Amino acid sequence: MKLTLRPRRATRPKAALFAELIWSHQGLLHRATTWPDVRFERREADDWVTIEPDEATLASAAARLDAAAWSAYLDYFPAEVRGFLCGFKYGRLAALQVITACPSLLGDLALVPALTAFVAAHERLRGTQLPRWAELTAVHERAGLFGVLEWLGLPASRQTLTILQNVLDPDLPQRLLEPLRSVLWEPETVVVLQRTRGLTDRQLARFCHPLAA
């Protein structure tokens, strides 16, 4: 009897098996594609269209994506990137947007994670209508982390970095960003914040009051 062998199925590239992040916002599907070619896209008709997610889209993702979805998505990320992103909860997708748009920032932001929220919100903080990722990358390449602080309107000082490193949870609420940026220009407040370890959102709000109200 002659045996007929079934043809083997073509092996899919391992990368094709990676999970994508998919969520719904305003009735439309959105997704973040897999590492290393991370893109943010929105489903329109039969196509996925590349987008620049705004704060509302990022907030929607934070509310809808659970730990299981993130675990599957991050499983094949490099350890350095995965470790950085896992330090965030509600701001994780915004942090992903920052380091994929400006990869050179990863090393510095890993040392000062709380600065990530300011970078992610730079469009609003700087009063621009569009994100300025290329400009930010150029500033960082030219002037390093102190240049980034200045670009964001923060005091370009070691005291600022120390205070941000003292922040316990890098997921800074959006409502605190502008008030905190303002109080960091006040010498008396800076002295106190610099000496306070493990700064919580509640403590920061107290220092920012009534600006954060």
Image (spheres, rainbow, N blue to C red):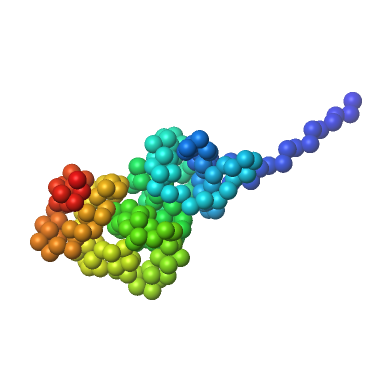
Judging depth in this view, the residue of 129 and 163 nearest the camera is 129
Q: How many marks?
A: 0
Q: Residue furthest right?
A: 1
- Please identify the quadrant where the C terminus is shown: top left
Residue drawn at the location 46% of the way across and 56% of the way down: 100
- Let me know if residue 116 appears in the view: no
Residue drawn at the location 25% of the way across and 68% of the way down: 156
The quarter of the displayed image where residue 140 is located = bottom left
Q: Residue furthest top?
A: 1
- Please identify the quadrant where the N terminus is shown: top right
Residue drawn at the location 35% of the way across and 56% of the way down: 124
Place of residue 132 in the rendered image (x, y in percent of width and height, measured from the top left) = 43, 62
- Let me know if residue 211 appears in the view: yes
Q: Is residue 127 left or right of residue 43?
A: left
Q: Is residue 181 left or right of residue 48?
A: left
Q: Is residue 186 left or right of residue 167?
A: left
Place of residue 75 in the rendered image (x, y in percent of width and height, measured from the top left) = 47, 43
Give above or below for 41 relative to 6: below
Judging depth in this view, the residue of 104 and 127 nearest the camera is 127
Give above or below for 29 relative to 182: above
Residue drawn at the location 63% of the way across and 44% of the way down: 47
Judging depth in this view, the residue of 48 and 170 nearest the camera is 48
Q: Is residue 22 left or right of residue 202?
A: right
Place of residue 65 in the rendered image (x, y in percent of width and height, measured from the top left) = 43, 37
Place of residue 189 in the rendered image (x, y in percent of width and height, measured from the top left) = 12, 58
The quarter of the displayed image where residue 148 is located = bottom left
